[in-house]
């Protein structure tokens, strides 16, 4: 997501898209399969292999099942059209290729219509472990497997519809925090223990370990209004992870109209990314080791 008024393509995005044109209305373009080099496919295979070795017992069953059901290619950057055949049949979603970060209103419009925007290009080998901009591995491997889960698929569509309204009400920062702490960096409690479902975690080797095993971060039970007033980190591991009990809980909590909630929270104090608040259901209080004292957004 990126506000249209301030939208400037990052350098790597501009470089990867030289010579390509996207639709100015919805930022989509045909997936340029011919642009993937042998190095790109090798990088995809490396990323895919190491996450698939790491995630069993860490990622939630729904994610692992979605990855298998979609038959995501392990050896080369997948063909979006082939994935869409399975995804459309399962939940009515499809993925669309975009050049990179897109404006908020365009992003929400896609989600509201069950289209997930996927950056078409892949990070370079020297950026294997971290890339601030979303690439095809983060967007596709991280996000798309859960779109085959009916409840999560409905949640993401509802989020898109809510985003369009939040933007008009000036409440986008609050709603963006919900996306960050669920879709990107969410954890889920299961009968087998705490598991990962957030795309920003499952697509990251180091954070897949850190979020579950490190004593540093807080792990706090899901609370909608609490999340909406909690800042987050974009440059380091998260200081706090929120834990849902089920995808149904997530969908039910976010189904009502948020207009009254936005009004209620408008004057509420905003919490730092690592704060523990009165009333929190604390699974684990972080020891704060390695935390920076600035950088929350």
Image (spheres, rainbow, N blue to C red):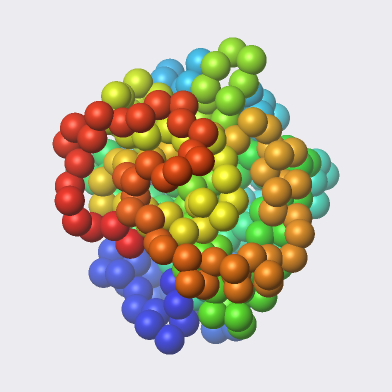
Q: Position of residue 227 (x, y in %)?
A: 50, 52
Q: Is residue 182 above or below residue 262?
A: above
User: Can residue 117 be seen by looking at this rendering?
Assistant: yes
Which residue occupies the foreground of this view, 23 or 255? Answer: 255
User: Can residue 75 be seen by looking at this rendering?
Assistant: no
Q: Name which residue lies at 35% across and 21% down.
A: 213
Quarter of the image with the C terminus is bottom left
In the figure, residue 137 lies in which quadrant? top left
Q: Position of residue 163 (x, y in %)?
A: 62, 69
Q: Is residue 134 left or right of residue 216?
A: right
In the figure, residue 208 lies in which quadrant? top left
Q: Position of residue 242 (x, y in %)?
A: 49, 39
Q: Is residue 265 left or right of residue 8?
A: right
Residue ranking furthest to the front: 278
Q: Position of residue 258 (x, y in %)?
A: 68, 66
Which residue occupies the foreground of this view, 251 or 72? Answer: 251
Q: Name which residue lies at 26% across and 52% down.
A: 235
Q: Name which residue lies at 30% across and 69% down.
A: 10
In the figure, residue 43 lies in which quadrant? top left
């Amino acid at each position: 997501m990126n506000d249209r008024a301030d939208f400037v393509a990052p350098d790597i995005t501009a470089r990867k898209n030289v010579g390509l044109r996207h639709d100015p209305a919805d930022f989509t373009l045909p997936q340029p399969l011919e642009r993937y080099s042998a190095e790109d496919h090798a990088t995809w295979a490396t990323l895919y292999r190491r996450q698939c070795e790491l995630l069993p017992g860490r990622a939630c069953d729904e994610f692992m099942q979605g990855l298998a059901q979609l038959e995501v290619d392990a050896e080369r950057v997948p063909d979006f059209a082939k994935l869409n055949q399975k995804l459309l049949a399962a939940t009515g979603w499809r993925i669309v290729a975009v050049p990179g970060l897109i404006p908020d209103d365009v992003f929400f419009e896609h989600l509201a219509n069950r289209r997930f925007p996927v950056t078409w290009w892949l990070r370079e080998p020297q950026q294997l472990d971290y890339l601030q901009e979303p690439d095809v591995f983060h967007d596709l491997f991280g996000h798309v497997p859960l779109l085959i889960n009916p409840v999560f698929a409905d949640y993401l569509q509802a989020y898109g519809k809510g985003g369009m309204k939040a933007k008009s009400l000036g409440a986008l920062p609050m709603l963006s925090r919900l996306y960050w702490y669920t879709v990107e960096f969410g954890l889920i409690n299961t009968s087998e223990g705490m598991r990962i479902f957030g795309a920003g975690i499952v697509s990251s080797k180091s954070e897949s370990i850190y979020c579950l095993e490190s004593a540093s971060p807080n792990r706090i039970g899901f609370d909608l209004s609490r999340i909406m007033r909690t800042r987050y980190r974009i440059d380091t591991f998260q200081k706090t992870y929120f834990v849902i009990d089920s995808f149904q809980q997530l969908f039910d909590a976010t189904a009502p109209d948020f207009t009254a909630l936005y009004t209620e929270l408008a004057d509420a104090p905003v919490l730092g990314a690592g704060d523990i608040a009165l009333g929190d259901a604390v699974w684990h209080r972080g020891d704060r080791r390695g935390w920076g004292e600035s950088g929350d957004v």
